[in-house]
Image (tube, rainbow, N blue to C red):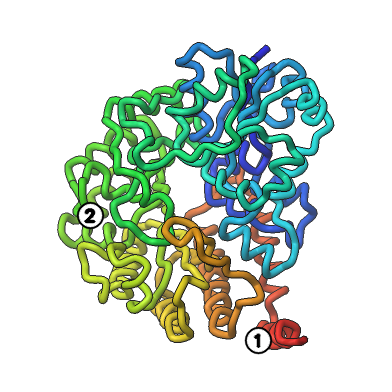
Amino acid sequence: MFDVVLTTDRTMMTNHHGKEFLGFMATGPALGLPEPIWLWVCAPKMKTDDVGRVWQAPYGMRKVEAVLMDAGFKVATIDPDHLDRHVKHAKVLLLSHHDYFALCPPSSEWWSITRKEPVNAKSFRRLMERPSLREAKRRGLKIIAGGPAAWQWLWKVDKWVEWGVDTVVDGEAEKVVVDLVSKALNDEPLPRYVYVGVDEVPKLEEIPTIKHASINGLIEVTRGCPRNCRFCSVTLRPLRHYTFDMIEQELKVNVSEGITEGIIHSEDVLLYGSRSVEPEPDAVIKLHKLVKSYYKKISWSHASLSAIKRAEEKYKLVTKVGEIICDDNQDYWGVEVGIETGSVKLAKKIMPAKSAPYPVEMWPQVVEDSFAIMHENHIIPAATLILGLPEETEDDVMKTAELLDRLRPYRSLIVPMFFVPMGYFKTHDWFTRVKIRDEHVEVMKRCLDHALYWANDIMSKFYLKGPSRAPLRWMLRLFLAYVKWRTRNIDKKIEEWKARRDSP
């Protein structure tokens, strides 16, 4: 058995049927479907070996697993369905999550608007309240929690205490986790909270390569971001590009364990190899040729809209990358992009470098031009925008609504998110349901209308094609039909909601 076990709940320990963006469904409550079916659609069970080790695991967990394996610990990443038998013997349990308590967007706005707890929070709570875990704590099991949502434990201290979490690690864990696990195994006192600051993050040579397959073949190529948006915590970390050798090692690991498709992960894929906001075409092309030589299909995790515009207009780089990606196996690729706001005035305050190398005054035009480039090159973006940013005015929100109208002709999904205090704004107040004004409702309505306009086109032409995907495709179309039915007479429903909101 294993001394150290890594795990998380079902909404994280899944490959979402090989379609990463289906994972967004796990951030909402089950609407129009029983929760078990909702979970099957967005978070099917992961294949495991005889002892419960998962075939694929979240990339960050694989990094921590690799550090501990290199240090000689007896460690494994275990599926939550097999956890009970392992915590009988394990001495340390490591947890990770993107959204432990559904405080991140879009979970927070789903919860705020519907007043129903999202399935990711419910799923994690069920994991932590298992009798086997409580019994293991009584026997002395040490629990260390980390990952992208580690900060949420500071807002849920009651659960921190109730569930017996010994230590929370906030930030990149590679340099601190070996010492913490060693102390836990030796019954030495553990710190309650560890914050990994800018000066303490691992250097490139201190970042290990994964030992086993990551979910949907995701491989990281860059950490950090040079744009310094004030609402984002990633900008607090220095920029580090993986070498081609490091990238190829991880590609080989995934392919050797049966992965045929993958995701290139960076805060801005088109800035791979760059030391500023100007793309390095040779590095980007070499990167894509390398990844495509291992994977049949690839997607991007994130790209900035300004990099898309610059890369295409100056270097025809998006077109050149498309010629590498699109072949007999693949005719489109996906990416997450950030619109954030359509207001130049607000952009100057919160993200003055997001449009660089273009002036911030051009931000709405940068957004529209980039959407046109993606549309022409068969890139399907899942875009986000933020409502309730600090110093936001009614005019700022309406500028965003106007920009949404201009984006109507471009194939995409656009998701409104409520402001969550992170980055330089971590001391600010949350944006919650009671703060929603009429102009926010208008933006959310236009986002919904945009999504419904493009959803069937995306699904029928690009997404979930083939007979093997028919049940999932049918289920998603049923859900879209439910949403359309629920949003009939939406203006009347909005007026009724406003009346409830404004009532004493």
Report the residue at 31% width, 26% height from top: 205
Where does residue 37 sit, x and y in percent of width and height? 75, 49
Answer left or right for 138 relative to 298: right
Q: Residue at x 76, y 27 (%)?
A: 137
Kind of residue sitting beneath label 2:
Val
Q: 166 or 11: nearer the eye?
A: 166
For badge 1, the amino acid type reads: Asp
- Marks 1 and 2 sit apart, C-alpha to C-alpha, by 42 Å
Q: Position of residue 74 (x, y in %)?
A: 58, 13
Q: How many marks?
A: 2
Image quarter where the C terminus lies is bottom right
Between circles 1 and 2, the one closer to the viewer is: 2
Identify the element where label 2 is drawn: loop
Residue 165 visible? The answer is yes
Residue 255 found in image quarter: top left
* Labels 1 & 2 near each other (Cβ < 8 A): no
Give the number of the disc on residue 382: none
Residue 459 image point, x, y percent:
54, 58
Can you name the residue that lies furthest to the front here? Answer: 189
**Local secondary structure at mark 1:** helix
Q: Is residue 401 left or right of residue 467?
A: left
Compared with 54, 477 (above or below) is below
Q: Which of the labelled discs sits on residue 277, or is there none?
A: 2
Label placed on residue 491 = 1
At x 51% / y 72%, what residue is drawn? 387
Point out the image quarter for the N terminus: top right
Q: Residues within 10 Å of mark 2 (few under 14, many from 20)?
A: many
